[in-house]
Amino acid sequence: MSNTQNNFSVIRRKSREEAFKCIFSMEFNEEYTPAELSFDNEQTEEEFDVKYIKNTVDGIVNNRKKIDEIISSSIKGRDFDRLSKQVIAILRLGVYEICFNKKIPSVSAISEAVKLGDIYCEEAEVAYINGVLNGIYKSRNKDAE
């Protein structure tokens, strides 16, 4: 992997984590709107893909009902409202990237969601995130055939 590709991967991973943090914070601040997303750091453009963050957060906000329906229909034997806030935020991000953002390969979206889970969730929750997102991915590919 070249330095440019590696640098892009690092920036995208940091940006995805920032998007997750925004999505997670919306669980506690219902008046939050994507327009409030702002970065004051002069190095922001070098550290983050601000366009990706804004597009992702906007996309999740605008498609939240559909995203939550996809998640709810994919979680067998569990109640959506009983999932932890961080699991819900990571699942929303993963489902958005799998179902609505065609620029990101679904396998990468799942892998990155699992990596976020490794940071912010308990071990059992990470396995759960992986299973739910893989199920959604397989279901969508089955439907496309």
Image (spheres, grey):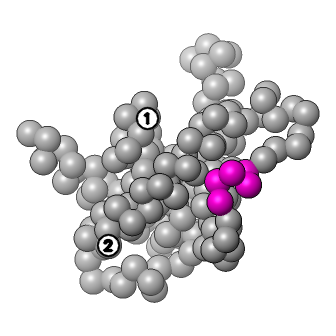
Looking at the figure, which quarter contains the C terminus?
A: top left
Q: Quadrant of residue 73?
A: bottom left
- Going by the numbered disc 1, the residue's amino acid type is Ile
Q: Describe the element under mark 2 as helix, strand or loop.
A: helix
Q: Describe the element under mark 1 as helix, strand or loop.
A: loop
Circle 2 residue:
72
Instruction: Kindly report the distance in space between the C-alpha atoms of the residues bearing marks 1 and 2.
Output: 23 Å
- Going by the numbered disc 2, the residue's amino acid type is Ser
Whether residue 105 is visible:
no
Q: Quadrant of residue 5?
A: top right
How far across and how far down the image is residue 55, in percent? Answer: 56, 41
Crowding at mark 2 (Cα within 10 Å: few <14, some 14-19, many 20+): some
How far across and how far down the image is residue 16, in percent? Answer: 61, 45
Looking at the figure, which quarter contains the N terminus?
A: top right
The magenta region covers 33-37
Q: Are marks 1 and 2 in contact (CB under 8 Å)?
A: no
| Front position in the image: 121 or 33 | 33
Main SS, magenta region, reads helix
Dot placed on the residue nearer the N-terminal end, 1 or 2: 2
Q: Which mark is residue 104?
A: 1
Residue at left offset 49%, top offset 69%: 88
Residue at left offset 35%, top offset 57%: 133
Residue at left offset 12%, top offset 48%: 143
Asked whether, in this view, residue 44 is left or right of residue 54, the answer is right
